[in-house]
Amino acid sequence: MTEKSSLVIVYHRQPYEEVVENGRVQYRENKSPNGIVPTLKSFFGRVDAGKGAWVAWKQVSPKAQEKFERVIRIEDSYGGYAVSRLPLTAEQVKSFYHVTSKEALWPILHSFPWLFRYENADWSTFREVNWLFAEAAASQAEEGALVWIHDYNLWLVPKYLRQIRPDLRIAFFHHTPFPAADVFNILPWREEIVDSLLDCDLVGFHIPRYARNFAEVARSLRDVEVEASERVEAGMSPVGQALSEPEVPTRLRHQGRSVGLDAFPVGTNPGFIHDLLQAEPSRELQAGIREELGDRRLLVAVGRTDYTKGMKETLEAFERLLKRRPELHGKIKLMVTSVSAASGMRIYRETQRDIEALVGRINGRFSTLSWTPILLFTNAIPFDRLIAYYRMADVCITTPLRDGLNLVAKEFVAAKQGASGSLVLSEFAGCAVELPQAVLTNPFSMRAMDAALDQALDMPAEEQRARMAAMEETVKHYDVSRWAEHTFERFDEIGRTRGQAPLAAAE
């Protein structure tokens, strides 16, 4: 019998890379310790050895489900932990993830209500899959354990888990934005979703605005009182920005229960990025990039294919730049990555086609024999190579129309290590409240985008270095280890209210 766990992480992705070698399945540790999956796995090192568990789904055909091994044991550099895998059919995955999550919930979360698709949504399958996640988490958790659920496609898990195991501590973290009540309440399942989140002990968000939006949604739908609020710390409350919030609710009260709210951004790993850049392979790669560029300036725009990421707006702004400033022809180059995130989705296919058509149009219009203005990658670039491009880039353009956080901006800052460079950042990216020294822009405005690109390209080197140094200090301060420390502090607060011991293992 598998030993029960004191910390159960529930996330839709598996915590390893699965490959087949010589007909046998191998589970390999993620190549890079950067990213959300390795970050979450690092929490297992803070509980007693072997006392962690992870719940994820895996697509399995109906015929293979009988022999499918649902719970496996993983040993890697993060220690030993159990992985409970839910065998979902292709039909369940399509309905739960590609249709209901991505076509109904995703547009609302990102404040694109005109893209909301209700007719195709299959809420019964969404409930069914969330119930399976809750059952799996309950079976892995020891008495009084903490179950940490991640992201909107598992919104109903807290409700079901509370029914199955009322003894558990339940925390939830949103990686996406959370919209205002007038947008969120478009969802026909709004009350069921909010009731589930109010069954949590702690609901977390990246930034104060999203926590406040959730509190207002809850108050609009249920008899909810804001029990406690606090001033937002200086590093996350710049005055006058689109996502600024001077005060954040920290505790709600509903039906005699206290529900904690948290707003703290996930960070990147500046130390790991520094070590990567100092290693000899990266130094050689950086030198090769510089030699290939010659005296040209490099602009980078990195993201996955999604209409919320603003890549079309970036490309259109770059096209206007080349039209407006012919003196830049042959002297700048834009490297773009647009990596498909979810296969089989019509709207993402259309977005990818639009991006490729824009790149073709711009290159066709402005290219010469010796210069092509845009280099487009449609496959993921390995992280160590991407960091080298960031290091050598003059400008990073990160202009999502809406984003929960955006780690690209933080990774670019960490890679520059105080050197000159400019970050053009959407004021609707969550991390904008942490990085006010960036060249902030409104991606919905062509004039604002044009002005931001001009400012970034024309900024004196001394000003670039000063802004970058200030942003680097913030990125180091709100790094991934500080997020982990803060999160465990909040977990232990839940335990203290129940008279339970701290979750973290004794040193």
Image: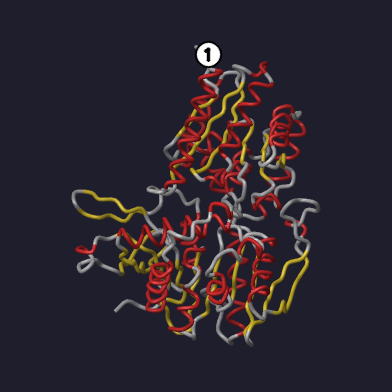
Q: Is residue 273 above or below residue 252?
A: above
Q: Which residue type does callout 1 highlight?
A: Thr
| Viewer-nearest residue: 103 or 408 | 103
Q: Residue at x 69, y 66 (%)?
A: 212
| Viewer-nearest residue: 91 or 2 | 91
Q: Position of residue 364 (x, y in %)?
A: 51, 19
Q: Residue at x 68, y 74 (%)?
A: 219
Q: Residue at x 54, y 68 (%)?
A: 188
Q: Residue at x 57, y 24 (%)?
A: 333
* Neighbour tally class for label 1: few under 14, some 14-19, many 20 plus, Cα within 10 Å: few
Q: Is residue 262 above or below residue 113?
A: below
Q: Is residue 243 above or below residue 421?
A: below
**Which quarter of the figure is the C terminus placed in?**
bottom right
Quadrant position of residue 207 = bottom right
Q: Position of residue 424 (x, y in %)?
A: 67, 38
| Viewer-nearest residue: 238 or 275 | 238
Left or right of residue 14: residue 177: right
Q: Position of residue 170 (x, y in %)?
A: 52, 76
To which residue does mark 1 refer?
368
